[in-house]
Image: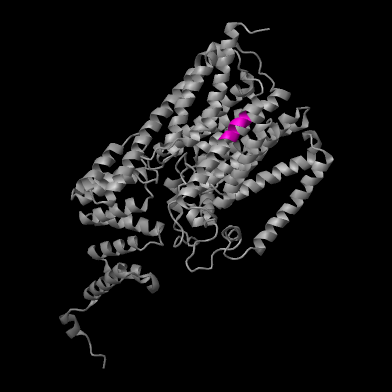
Amino acid sequence: MPHPPESRSADALRRLLFWGFFGFVLLALNCIVDVSAWDVTLIPRLLALLAFLFGAVAVTALPAVRRALDATVLRERPVLLFAGYLLVTCGSLAMATNVSAGFTDVFRTLATFVTLCLACLVLPIVPDWRRHVVAIVVAAGLVAATIGIVEIATRLGPGIHGRRAMELVTGLMSNVNLYAGLLALILPWCLCGAVVLRAAGRAWATLAAAAVLALVVLLQSRAAWLAVLAGAAAGGGLLLAAGGSFGLSPRARRLLAATFLLAPCGLVAGVAAAPADNVIAARFRSIFAGSAAPNAPPREGGRLMVWGITARMIADHPVAGVGAGNFPVRFHEYFGGDDLDFSNVDTNWLEPHNDFLWVAAEKGVPGLLLFAGVFLAAFGCGRTVLRSAASATDRWLALAACMALVSYVALSCFDFPLERVNHQVFLALPLAVLVVLKHGVSPAAPPPPSPLLARFGRLFLVPCTLASLALGIAYATAALRQEREVLAARRAWKEGRWEDVRAAARRARTPWKTLDPLASPISFLEGMAEVRLGRLPEAIACLERARRENPNRMYVTNNLGILYARSGRLDEAIELFVTVAQRYPHRLEPFVNLAGCLIDAGRPEEAVALLEDIPEGVRDDAVVRNLDIARERTAATTAPSPQAAAAEPSGR
């Protein structure tokens, strides 16, 4: 029987919403870049996602669409726990040293939560949504792999290239590790598509899985390798434990068991037997043995040391954390320990390369429990689906979702997918699939009827969501404009165009965001331009503001101390240099500057003691010069006068 015209139009609108929503967040979003921004993907994609979600929420509020949505799915535990995590993220700003530094995290978490809610609502509104959503992810995998292959072919040429060369391949992400991590999150869905799709769809999914896996291997991101292996182990274990419920024959299960038994042995044997110049095997061996070259960075890139610092930060702020986005602001407070050696490790860590430690440091133990609880609740949903009488297709989707979550957790332990909007979307997808599948076999118990609560939801929930997204759009717009101006300022800095540096820095200033993508205050750029232009009072005012915005940034405090010394404010300069020297014992600049101020303040003996503590092997020309001056001044102040020398007894 044909549908009436109104029903057909409503059905078309729902299909348009489904394909438009998942097509954008899973495919189109990965292709958005802004080359005029400092980070070509982070803020541009956040802005695009927030604007898209604003429109999507408005569409779902339309009566024709709203009537087709089952809002009870939002009562499932993963959704509620993520809502709690969002609230804790917002609340953590009360503890922040720099509130504006946390807005990116707040609005990124908001975007992830709204994406999760909309995915839960939109998934079931079309028939055969299971195959449709898998097909979209397969298409995303093909596009992502094609972009990477083209980049390798055009930038590097054919063949297997070393890790250093592969750093040029970004796949429209900000770096190769983020690109490889995204591919690792896509892979389980491509493998699922090779099973659940029909005819040509299976062939395309198999091709996508092969291309994605090959790229993950070639890109040589060890965190992505671990994510793939962890996801494969989880999926293989579930298939071996309950292969019959997936429709696997006994022969297929035996073959699978043999594969999972022999594959690790083959991997180890292949790596061990590979020649020393094999770049893939060498990269794999680097997991277990660092480089023998002198002054080479540790094999884990300094993560163990940074994790130790993060653990101290957590111990100091266990309840509320240091505030969303404030890890890089507070991180340098912990640099003064004797067990830290940053001589061959980068000091500008914007995140600890472990999302769970990152969440605990910025949002306290409650934030960590809620964040981890989302994953545990999602795995609980998967367990419910796999133990139910669900269809084989539902089981395969639940398996793919669990594999994707395991891969995400493994990736989170060594990288920072939490920072990236794309990775958060591919976190929301398996969460939504598991929630919807579980809701289909075991719906959450409805709360007691409450007319007041229902009216609040109708009258305030959608407007509040739209208002929050609008705030996020305003923030992301200002942040994107700031990134463009910061890039312009730094380019002018390299060319010595200080008027242009100051102008760009002033244009970049916004109350929404006071730090640039490298956690340096915008005021610092303006202040250093004022220094070069000879405007000392204005430069001091800018750097004082910069120190309030990031009190632990070495270059801010060190240069402010220099300006204090130039203006005769020696006591304030000495105080700043003492702080910097204690916080950065591996840098010579603060010790040299402190010694110079002590000499000018008539305290050369203290300068001598300070500089003599620096090992001779690391002393540079500035240290030697200041030490000579300090010794001369000390000798001059302690030498007896002629009259005193004449009055001394001869000693005979």
Q: How many marks?
A: 0
Residue under the point 35% across and 43% down: 549
Residue under the point 54% across and 65% down: 291
Residue under the point 64% across and 63% down: 274
Q: Find residue 16 and report its horizontal and vertical position in percent.
A: 55, 20
Q: Find residue 138 and report its horizontal and vertical position in percent.
A: 60, 35
Predominant secondary structure, magenta span: helix
What is the magenta range? 133-139
Q: Inspect this view and state whether residue 512 appears.
A: no
Q: Inspect this view and state whether residue 367 appears.
A: yes
Q: Residue furthest left?
A: 643
Q: Is residue 10 above or below residue 568?
A: above
In terms of depth relative to the viewer, which is nearer, 440 or 139? 139
Q: Magenta segment: does it hold 418?
A: no
Q: Is residue 561 above or below residue 40?
A: below
Q: Residue furthest top?
A: 4
- Image quarter in which the N terminus is found: top right
Q: Find residue 624 and report its horizontal and vertical position in percent.
A: 30, 72
